[in-house]
Image (spheres, helix red, strand yellow):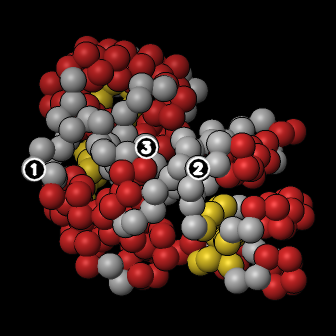
Amino acid sequence: MFAEYDNLPLSTRFSPSMTVFLHNVGVIPVNPFVAYSKKKENRNTADVALTLSAIEDILIKEIPAEAVIICTHDIDLYPLILWLIEHTGKEILLASFPERTNRLYNSVLVGDCVDLNVYLRLAVEEASKNLAGGMGEITKKLSLTEKDLEFMEKIEDTFGSTYVSDLREKIERKILHSPEKIDKEICEKFKKKLFSGLKGWLRKENFASTGLIIGSWLPKWNLGISDLQANECLKQIIQGKEFEEEGIYFEFEKEKDGLIYGKFYRTKEGE
C-alpha cells in the first residue's frame, strides 16, 4: 500500500505511529511513506512519487504482492496507473475518499475504487483504543484540544465508533475539566510576553480581554503551548497578582469548563 503519510489524520498525535495501526488492521506497506511536498508549485510531487515507488517495487525489485493499493485522487495519474496495471499483471487498486474521485475515470480506466473511509475507520478505532487506554497522565506531548474533540465528533458521527466515543468522553473529563501540567519555564516566558503585550496594548486601548490574549496574541508568540495550557499560566499569574506591580489590574468575569474569562485594565497609577 502506498500513501502520503502527512495526509493521514492526526498522524503526529499517535504513539506508536500510524504505520503500526495500519499493520494492526491488516495493511502492510512495502516501502516507507512518501513525504508530502508543501511547495505550492509542486503539488503533484508526492502523487508521482507514489506511483513511481510502486513501479520500482513491483517491476524492478519484484517484491511479491497479490494486490497493490495506491492512495491518490489525482486523475492526471490515472493513465500511469493504467500502464502499471497492464505491465505488472497484478491487481492495482486506487483508494481515495468517494467525494474526491472522478467516477468516470474510476469506471473507465481503473475499475472499482477502494473506499479509503474503511481504512480510516479501522485506523482511527485502533488509534483511539490505544490512546484511550493510556489517558492516565496528561502529558505536554499529547496536547489534545477542542479542535481534536470536534474532529473526533465528526469521526463518531460518520462511523459510530465506540472507541472514539469513549476517548472523547475521557478527553472532555480529563483535559477540558482539569488543569494541565505545564513547565514553570514556559509559564515564565508566557508571563513576559503577556506583560509586554499588555503594556503596549493598554497605552492605546481601554482593556485587553482574555479572548484577545489567547485567541490572537498566543499564536503569534510561538510558545508551543495549547490554549488550555496558556489558560493555566494565566490563572497562575492572576492568582499571584504580579501584574498589579506593572500598573495593571484584572477584572474577573466568569470561569467555565476550567477556562477563565475577564479583562485587563490599566490602573490610574499605571497611566
Q: Quadrant of the N terminus?
A: bottom right
Quarter holding the C terminus?
top left
Which of the 4 image quadrants contains residue 70? bottom right
| Nearest to N terminus: mark 1 or mark 3 | 3
In the rendered structure, which amino acid carries the disc numbered 3? Thr
Between 252 and 164, the one nearer to me in the picture:
164
**Foreground disc of the pair 1, 3:** 3
The mark nearer the N terminus, 3 or 2, is 3
At x 30% / y 36%, what residue is drawn?
141
Q: Taking 163 as reference, is 213 left or right?
A: right
Alpha carbon distance from label 3 to label 2: 29 Å
Say which element carries label 2. loop
Disc 3 marks which residue? 12
Give the label on residue 136, or none: 1
Q: Which amino acid does label 2 sit on?
A: Ile
Disc on the earlier residue, 1 or 2 = 2
**Label 2 Cα neighbours within 10 Å, binned few <14 / some 14-19 / many ≥20:** few
Residue 154 at what x, y percent from top left?
45, 74
Q: Name the residue under label 2.
A: 63
Mark 1 residue element: loop
Instruction: Say if residue 19 shows up in the picture.
Output: yes
Measured as percent of width and height from the top left, residue 219 is found at: 51, 34
Q: Is residue 13 visible?
A: no
